[in-house]
Amino acid sequence: MSVTLSDEDLWLTFREGDDAAYTLLYFRYADRLYSYLRLLLGAGSERHNIEDVFQETWIRVYREKERFEIRAAGTFSGWLFRIAHNYSMSLLRRPHYVSSFNELADDKFLYNYASTSAQETLSDEHSAEEIIVLLRSVVEGLPISFKEVYILSEFERMNIDQLTEALGISKVNAKVRLFRARKLVREKMIDLLGIDKSFADNSEGHDKLI
């Protein structure tokens, strides 16, 4: 079976009874899904919760193969992350849930982000490692509705259509949340890094509501 098949082609093959297609989908998304859950839920002492959500997500994907309908390209990834999102929200609503970013210093998504867009946009005087520490604290402090849309957009590179599929919200809502999340992160990082606000305003463009 070709690994160049689209997600939707693999899903159709899986529904026809070929579990190898499910395995390919799993390996295509496992790392991305786990990294998303770590960013959303935290790590450290809460790692077992991440494992539970991760496993439950893939179990539901397998069990509901007859119920899921492909509507367009990108539908599978949106559905997959929406399942994970729903399980995560149920977990976060539990009393006394505490998340921790203590183990995210080596996360490849944070490192890549800090090494490229964050560092180039916000500062040329701080190392990627320093920005990672600041960025993870800023992301952790976002309201959950902003945090989830920010992570999916900035780290998973989902577009607006995919965000609406994953989060079950309207396009307008997704755009507004993303705009506000980016603005909050940008403003907080500017403050933490001591960037001249007038210079930062002149270089702004990433945070426009589209």
Image: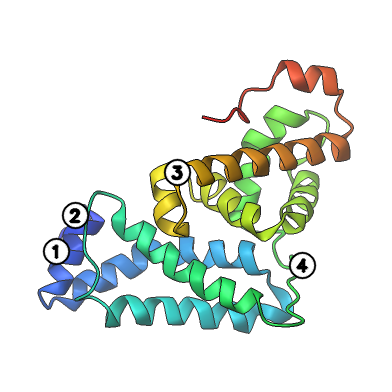
Residue 180: image tag: none
Q: Name the residue under label 3.
A: 171
Q: Where is residue 59 in the image (x, y as percent from the top left)?
A: 36, 82
The residue positioned 19% from the left and 78% from the top of the image is 19
> Is 173 rendered above or below residue 12?
above
Residue 102: image tag: 4
Q: Disc 2 to disc 1, how far (Cα)?
A: 8 Å
Q: Assign a secondary structure to mark 3.
A: helix
Q: Assign a secondary structure to mark 2.
A: loop
Nearer the observer, disc 4 or disc 3?
Answer: 3
Q: Disc 3 to disc 2, how far (Cα)?
A: 28 Å
The amino acid beneath tag 4 is Asn
Does label 1 or label 3 sit earlier along the sequence?
Answer: 1
Label 3: few (<14), some (14–19) or many (≥20) C-alpha neighbours in 10 Å = some
> Is 101 rendered above or below residue 163?
below
In this rendering, would 13 be left or right of 143? left
Q: Disc 1 to disc 4, how far (Cα)?
A: 40 Å
The amino acid beneath tag 3 is Lys
Does label 1 or label 4 sit earlier along the sequence?
Answer: 1
Q: Assign a secondary structure to mark 1.
A: loop
Say if mark 1 contacts mark 4, CB within 8 Å.
no
Nearer the observer, disc 3 or disc 2?
Answer: 3
The amino acid beneath tag 1 is Met
Q: Name the residue under label 1.
A: 1
Q: What residue occupies the far right of the structure in this picture?
A: 194
- Can residue 159 be spotted in the picture? no
